[in-house]
Image (cartoon, rainbow, N blue to C red):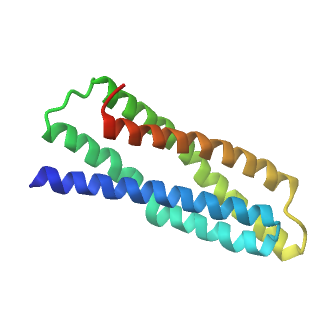
Amino acid sequence: MTYLVIKWLHVLSSTILFGTGIGSAFYMLLTSLGRDARTVARVSKLVVLADWLFTTPTAILQPATGLYLVHLANMEIGSRWLAWSIGLYVLAIACWLPVVFLQIRLAASARVSADTGRPLSTGYWRLLSIWAALGAVAFFAFVAIFWLMVTKVA
């Protein structure tokens, strides 16, 4: 029974982690492309909040439940599919951590633009480009992890 509960938590937290990431990226990117600084300021503030409320706890829960599942199932931590999954997870989180700080800076920059009535700055667009690139790497890493978790081939 313990294994099933931990597996359920692992699958549920991966769904929340991935879903929040896609949803946040979608709204942040499309709102930014709309170029309304006031809207961007509001949405980017909510994206930061969503990261703290949903992404952060699930990013912590994923390796905790995953490693506990490995222990409960007596899996080989060195098996290729598991090693690749862990490596890709480290890559995804290494991309996500700077994204969190970029989102805070993007929100602050959009707030300044909204308060002064100016368009989003060139600095905003430069940070957004870095944010998008890091997000794309994390997205594809998570897609690959899902594949490995389902197929267990590598």
Residue occupying image coordinates x 67% and y 62%: 28
Give the vertical position of 79 relative to 58 (above or below): above
Residue occupying image coordinates x 21% and y 27%: 76
Q: Is residue 99 left or right of residue 118?
A: left
The tally of labels here is 0
- 143 or 77: nearer the eye? 143
Picture quarter with the C terminus: top left
Residue 46 locus on image (x, y percent): 60, 70
Residue 35, image quadrant: bottom right
Residue 26, image quadrant: bottom right
Give the vertical position of 153 relative to 25 (above or below): above
Q: Is residue 87 left or right of residue 139?
A: left
Residue occupying image coordinates x 33% and y 53%: 61
Residue 96 locus on image (x, y percent): 54, 47
Residue 120, image quadrant: bottom right
Q: Is residue 119 left or right of residue 80?
A: right
Taking the view exactly as shown, the residue that stands out farthest to the right is: 118
Residue occupying image coordinates x 24% and y 56%: 8
Residue 141 locus on image (x, y percent): 50, 38
